[in-house]
Image (cartoon, rainbow, N blue to C red):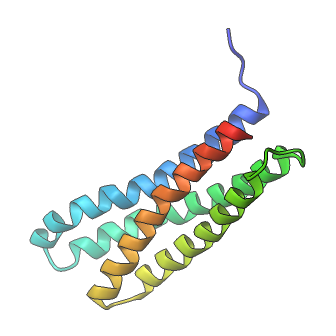
Amino acid sequence: MLSPTLTTIRLFLHVLAAAIWVGGQFALAGMVPGLRKVGPDATKAAANGFARLAWPAFAVAFGTGIWNMLAAGTELPAGYNAVLGIKILLVVVAGVSAFAHAASENRAVKAMTGAVGAIIGVVILFLGVLLVSHG
């Protein structure tokens, strides 16, 4: 039987947090048209509920990401640090985009920052898989 290790737990927490953050954005985006039909405050209520899960998930993903970097060591394949740097930059952009999305009252800004954040989230997930498969 396989036994979990600290590495397994670290990676599980990182992937779980990323799944909540990115997957939740897509789930909420899919619900928005129906929520708008329910009432004027339904979308905002759902978004606030998601935020109570999403921001802690973002924090867990960020923290376990740092833990992953520390655990990766210094002898890494060529290009690993470049991909890691791009991933870190995109994490910052995704966080700023999500914050701007939550803070804005402008529907166009919300649409743009929501789309940017979701697309970047998918790219970040891909880069994470790329790093794990080459690290």
Camera-side residue: 14 or 82?
82
Q: Residue at x 60, y 67 (%)?
A: 91
Considering depth in this image, is 51 or 71 the residue closer to the camera?
Answer: 71
Q: Residue at horizontal 16%, vertical 67%?
A: 33
Q: Is residue 113 left or right of residue 7?
A: left
Direction front: furthest residue: 78
Q: Please provide percent x and percent y for residue 112.
A: 35, 80
36 left or right, relative to 46: left
Q: Position of residue 119 (x, y in %)?
A: 42, 64
- Dividing the image into 4 quarters, which one contains the C terminus? top right
Quadrant assignment, res 4: top right
Q: In the image, is 23 to the left or to the right of 36?
A: right
On screen, residue 117 above or below 82: below
Residue 28 coordinates in the image, percent (x, y): 31, 61
Name the quadrant containing residue 117: bottom left
Task: From the viewer's perspective, tell me whether residue 6 is left or right of residue 102.
Answer: right
